[in-house]
Image: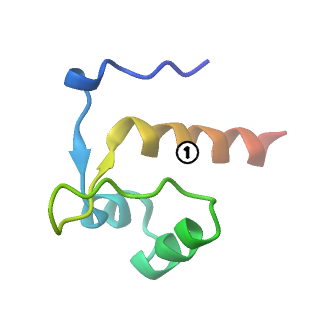
Amino acid sequence: MYTKPALLEDQFIDMKFITQLTGLSDKWFYKLIQDGAFPKPIKPGRASRWLKSDLEEWLYYRIYESRT
Protein backbone atom coordinates (compact mmCIF):
# COMPACT_ATOMS: atom_id res chain seq x y z
CA MET A 1 0.00 0.00 0.00
CA TYR A 2 1.00 3.63 -0.38
CA THR A 3 3.06 5.22 2.43
CA LYS A 4 3.43 9.00 2.66
CA PRO A 5 6.96 10.39 2.95
CA ALA A 6 8.01 12.48 5.92
CA LEU A 7 6.91 16.08 5.51
CA LEU A 8 10.46 17.38 5.03
CA GLU A 9 11.01 14.80 2.29
CA ASP A 10 7.81 15.81 0.48
CA GLN A 11 7.49 18.60 -2.13
CA PHE A 12 5.06 21.44 -2.62
CA ILE A 13 3.65 21.49 -6.16
CA ASP A 14 1.46 23.97 -8.01
CA MET A 15 -1.54 23.56 -10.30
CA LYS A 16 0.66 23.85 -13.38
CA PHE A 17 2.57 20.73 -12.28
CA ILE A 18 -0.70 18.88 -11.61
CA THR A 19 -2.27 19.75 -14.96
CA GLN A 20 0.90 18.95 -16.91
CA LEU A 21 1.23 15.58 -15.18
CA THR A 22 -2.40 14.53 -15.61
CA GLY A 23 -3.38 16.29 -18.84
CA LEU A 24 -6.53 17.51 -17.11
CA SER A 25 -7.60 21.15 -16.77
CA ASP A 26 -7.27 23.34 -13.72
CA LYS A 27 -11.01 24.05 -13.87
CA TRP A 28 -11.68 20.32 -13.56
CA PHE A 29 -9.44 20.08 -10.48
CA TYR A 30 -11.02 23.13 -8.83
CA LYS A 31 -14.46 21.53 -9.38
CA LEU A 32 -13.16 18.33 -7.72
CA ILE A 33 -11.89 20.41 -4.78
CA GLN A 34 -15.28 22.07 -4.47
CA ASP A 35 -16.95 18.63 -4.49
CA GLY A 36 -14.51 17.28 -1.88
CA ALA A 37 -13.00 14.79 -4.34
CA PHE A 38 -9.49 16.31 -4.48
CA PRO A 39 -7.34 17.68 -1.64
CA LYS A 40 -7.76 21.36 -0.78
CA PRO A 41 -4.70 23.51 -1.44
CA ILE A 42 -2.25 24.71 1.16
CA LYS A 43 -2.07 28.52 1.07
CA PRO A 44 1.39 29.85 1.95
CA GLY A 45 0.38 33.46 1.37
CA ARG A 46 -1.64 34.02 -1.80
CA ALA A 47 -0.30 31.03 -3.72
CA SER A 48 -1.99 27.61 -3.79
CA ARG A 49 0.20 24.56 -3.34
CA TRP A 50 -0.39 20.85 -2.77
CA LEU A 51 1.80 18.17 -1.30
CA LYS A 52 3.14 15.89 -4.00
CA SER A 53 2.34 12.92 -1.77
CA ASP A 54 -1.35 13.96 -1.69
CA LEU A 55 -1.43 14.03 -5.50
CA GLU A 56 0.28 10.63 -5.68
CA GLU A 57 -2.19 9.16 -3.19
CA TRP A 58 -5.12 10.57 -5.19
CA LEU A 59 -3.68 9.12 -8.44
CA TYR A 60 -3.04 5.69 -6.89
CA TYR A 61 -6.62 5.61 -5.66
CA ARG A 62 -7.97 6.51 -9.13
CA ILE A 63 -5.85 3.78 -10.71
CA TYR A 64 -7.04 1.26 -8.12
CA GLU A 65 -10.69 2.26 -8.66
CA SER A 66 -10.41 1.90 -12.43
CA ARG A 67 -9.00 -1.62 -12.17
CA THR A 68 -11.38 -3.16 -9.67
Q: Name the image quarter holding residue 59.
A: top right
Percent x, y for residue 22?
44, 60
Front-most of 12 and 42? Answer: 42
When the figure is inspected, residue 64 is found, relative to residue 35, above or below; the finding is above
Q: Which is nearer the eye, 33 or 53?
A: 33
Please state if 16 lies on the left or on the right of 61 as rendered.
left
Q: Residue at x 43, y 77 (%)?
A: 25
Q: Residue furthest front?
A: 45
Point out residue 2 in the picture as x, y percentages from the top left corner.
55, 22
Q: Which residue lies at the image location 36% right of the left edge and 66% below the top edge?
A: 19
Q: Nearer the viewer, residue 33 or 44?
A: 44
Per the image, label 1 sits on a secondary structure element best described as helix
- Residue denoted by label 1: 58
Please say if 7 is above or below 54. above
- The amino acid type found where label 1 is placed reads Trp
Quarter of the rendering occupied by the N terminus = top right
Give the residue drawn at x 85%, y 39%.
68
Residue 53 percent across, percent down from the top left: 39, 35
Across and down, in percent, residue 15 comes to 30, 65
The residue furthest right is: 68
- Is 50 located above or below residue 29 in the figure? above
**What is the residue that sits farthest to the bottom in this orientation?**
27
Q: 10 Å neighbourhood of mark 1: few (<14), some, or many (≥20)?
A: some
Q: Is residue 44 left or right of residue 4?
A: left
How many callouts does the rendering have?
Answer: 1
